Amino acid sequence: MQSDTHVNALSEAFFGQLALYSVAHFCVDFACGALVAGMVWPSDYAYAGVILYNGLAFAGQMPLGIWADKFNRNALVAAMGCALVFLGLIAGLCLPEVILISVILAGVGNAFFHLGGGIDVLNSSGERLGPLGIFVSPGALGLFLGISLAPGDLTEALLPMILNVLCAVGILIYQLKVFHSLKSQNEPLSFALQKPKGMGLCLYALLGLFLVVALRSYVGFALSFSWKTGVWVTVLTVALVAGKRLGGLLSDWIGLQKTAIATLAIAALAFLFPDVPAMGTLAVLFFNMTMPMTLWALTRIMSGARGFAFGTLTCALYVGWLPIAFKWAPKLQMGAPFAVLTIVSLALLIPALAACPKGSPK
């Protein structure tokens, strides 16, 4: 009976932590979206500022993940991230002539938060993907609303500033009250790969998962539905958020490979009808369900460096965005090209999932 009580207490502690990190994820991306849209983009350094911010916030997680794994204070790292985002907003308001200071603070803060919260969720979720989807999904909604806010003065910026301070304090209080220490349960830092099916397939899985995420990022930024105006912008954002959340839950229910095949097949079919809003919405919904799968799979292979693995995939998001930002790739016609890219994503993902160590969901 005592053992069951202990397990229940741990479960309650984990779900409380997950809820807190999910809310904080919304607040951090809400503030960062508001900062970029309201302070960086109107400045003389708009283009450089956005590239630098994304580089720090996404690609920066890869090297910072090594430090976070070793530091082993995940809640403190996440709280520091919230605080840095707050300082970034302050800097943007007080020193608009040197907006790059604000960009650096917010970019590094965003990276810190994602690593601290992400590693804790990965450590606690075990074989389940559902918690990963729950943690990852609120960010897209926060970013959308933050960009919509685009504050230009202190009054408009107060809400994201206050939210991030509350999140930083709340994360630290919860960690100390429930877990009684700032120290986390990270595994000792190790870059040893879990390779139950041989080094060759393991290395393919690493490359395949990176490419799947980069491709998902590229497709997301390349989409240009002709009807994406008014209420449909909100509908597509909700589909994006729901896809990331449902992907993890569905994987726990029927298994990773079945979920990958079903969701990407439906997405490919839906992409063939880009002029129909309902089909475009379904395409976005199902295409984004692979997010928790790729994250879970890579951290299974690199279980001794979960922060680095997390950062590797956020770096892939940055890589997928670069061709759009610099206009390196030709503009794709809507319809069949996106369906083909979805099938390519599926072809890369299935062997990568098959290379994961045993113990994966179903």
Image (tube, rainbow, N blue to C red):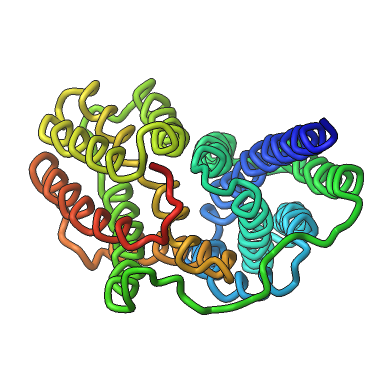
**Quarter of the figure with the N terminus:** top right
Residue plotted at (41% across, 31% down): 253
Residue plotted at (45% across, 52% down): 359
Q: Is residue 68 left or right of residue 325?
A: right
Residue 272 is situated, as x and y percent measured from the top left of the image, at 10, 34
Residue plotted at (68% across, 74% down): 188
Question: Residue 202 is drawn in which quadrant?
Answer: bottom left
Which residue lies most toward the front here?
Answer: 1
**Quarter of the figure with the C terminus:** top left
Q: Is residue 216 left or right of residue 59?
A: left
Q: Is residue 112 above or below residue 224?
A: below
Q: Is residue 258 left or right of residue 116?
A: left
Q: How many marks?
A: 0
Residue 304 is situated, as x and y percent measured from the top left of the image, at 58, 70
Q: Is residue 12 above or below residue 40?
A: above
Residue 18 appears in view: yes
